[in-house]
Image (tube, helix red, strand yellow):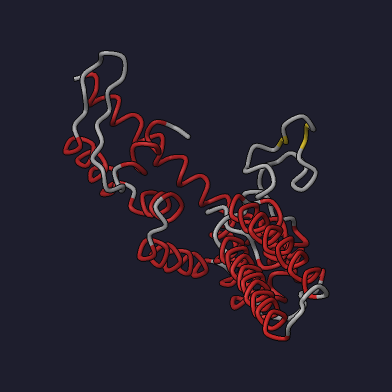
Amino acid sequence: MSRAIELFARMHEVRSVTADERGRQTLTGDVILAVFGKVQHKMPLGMDLLMAKYVHDAPAANRIIDVMATWLNDESLKRKDLAIALSCVAFDVFCDKPVASQKRQLAALCRKYSDQAKRSNRLIKGWQVKTKRLQRNIDGCETQTAEERLLSAIYELEALIIKEHRRIDEYAQSQSLKSSTCPRCNGTGSILNTGECPSCGGRGLFVPSVDNIRQHLRHIGLGRVSDKLWERELKPWFEKCLGNLYVESSSVVSLLSDELHKEQAN
């Protein structure tokens, strides 16, 4: 992550920020905000892209989608409804969000490898051990009251296990909607002592393929897309949208870096 993006993200945290690098002049929060405002005036779409991707700003995301819809005005596409849907998919890909066909795999990995899942699994295993021990003790009960007491404790532990399974399932599902970062390697692309992460193939992210994008249209209820339509219209449009987003964001980061450098040099 570039210094400009780092400062951009930190300025939207609760704590204030200054930029102080190796004895050079410190940039106060007011100066950094002034630079951001200046760049916002010059490149509003680019700044909205940074807001949406790094700060998860919903209004910025809505503005971007509105701008992308205007791009279709100069296009002679037969299926503009599918093109609009693909614009939104391109935006999700730009923001490193998984498409629908990847969410199930991400949720499964999160359910197994996330820190939250590991804590939940430890709890569940502990309760399962206690349950088995109590079940073994039932045969040695001399009174019905003692047996009922053990059964009550077993039922409570089983309820906790079911509740914890449900909780980790909900957590995994929610996480799968937020990021395409691999839960197994945490985005590093490698696993300690084993090398390349087998789940993401060493990429650290689940980058959607062409098939993933086509499947996504089916997942959101738009049906199958023919090879002819995909190759002639939709695939080029998707690549054009995604390329525009990356070019715009790269340009705004470059401008931010230049303006911050100028302020620091003064």
Image vertical order of residue 36 relative to residue 75, above or below: above
Q: Nearer the viewer, residue 257 or 170?
A: 170
Image vertical order of residue 210 relative to residue 34, above or below: below
Quadrant of res 257: top left
The residue located at (47%, 40%) in the rendering is 250
Question: Could you tell me which quadrant the C terminus lies in?
Answer: top left
The residue located at (63%, 42%) in the rendering is 187
Where is residue 74 shown, x and y percent of the image? 51, 66
Image vertical order of residue 248 relative to residue 64, above or below: above
Image vertical order of residue 21 relative to residue 63, above or below: above
Give the farthest residue toward the top.
23
The residue located at (40%, 67%) in the rendering is 62
The residue located at (60%, 50%) in the rendering is 115
Left or right: where 50 falls relative to 211: left
Where is residue 122 shown, x and y percent of the image? 66, 54
Where is residue 171 shown, x and y percent of the image? 58, 64
Where is residue 107 shown, x and y percent of the image? 67, 62
Q: Nearer the viewer, residue 166 or 236?
A: 166
Count of numbered circles on the image? 0
Give the farthest residue toward the front.
142
Q: Nearer the viewer, residue 249 or 137?
A: 137
Give the farthest residue toward the left.
30
Q: Is residue 15 visible?
A: yes
Quadrant of res 217: bottom right
Q: Is residue 106 visible?
A: no
